[in-house]
Image (cartoon, rainbow, N blue to C red):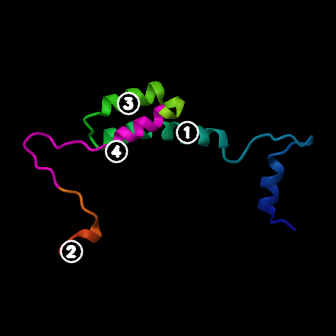
Amino acid sequence: MLHPLIRVAVTQAVDSAGRYTGGGLPKGGVMLVVLVLLYGLPSMLAWSRRSSRRWKITAINLLLGWTVIGWVVAMVLTFLYEPPPPGETDTPHHRADDADVPRS
């Protein structure tokens, strides 16, 4: 026997002919929002990291992102090494387990 609230929720979404009449989570809308956010991810990351290539990444993402290859290129450009601005020193990037290990 179903709980009365579950029974009402199940029976309300179907009419007498068995057709879906709506209700519940709009899955198409949620999927559309997720896909748009995923499509724009390289641009959003470039802007949040203040990358010097952010305009180039955004252009590639908007114009070629739909090809998937363009999206991957934009994502790779987002994470490529960028030298520091003039006047700032570049800090070496070491793995955590290599720190303070004497070399022989």
Q: Which residue is mark 1?
A: 35
Q: Is residue 78 left or right of residue 52?
A: right
Q: What residue appears at the point 75 percent right and 41 percent down from the top-left corner? A: 22
Could you say where residue 72 lies in the image, as x and y percent from the top left? 46, 38
Q: Which mark is residue 58?
A: 3
| Amino acid type for the residue under numbered disc 4 | Phe
Rounded to the nearest angstrom, the CA distance separating label 3 from label 4 is: 14 Å
| Amino acid type for the residue under numbered disc 1 | Leu
Toward the top, the furthest residue is 63
Q: Which residue is mark 2?
A: 101
Could you tell me which secondary element the residue under label 4 belongs to?
Answer: helix
Could you tell me which secondary element the residue under label 1 belongs to?
Answer: helix
The span picked out in magenta is 70-91
The mark closer to the camera, 2 or 1, is 2
Of 33 and 81, nearer the camera is 81
Of 11 and 70, nearer the camera is 70
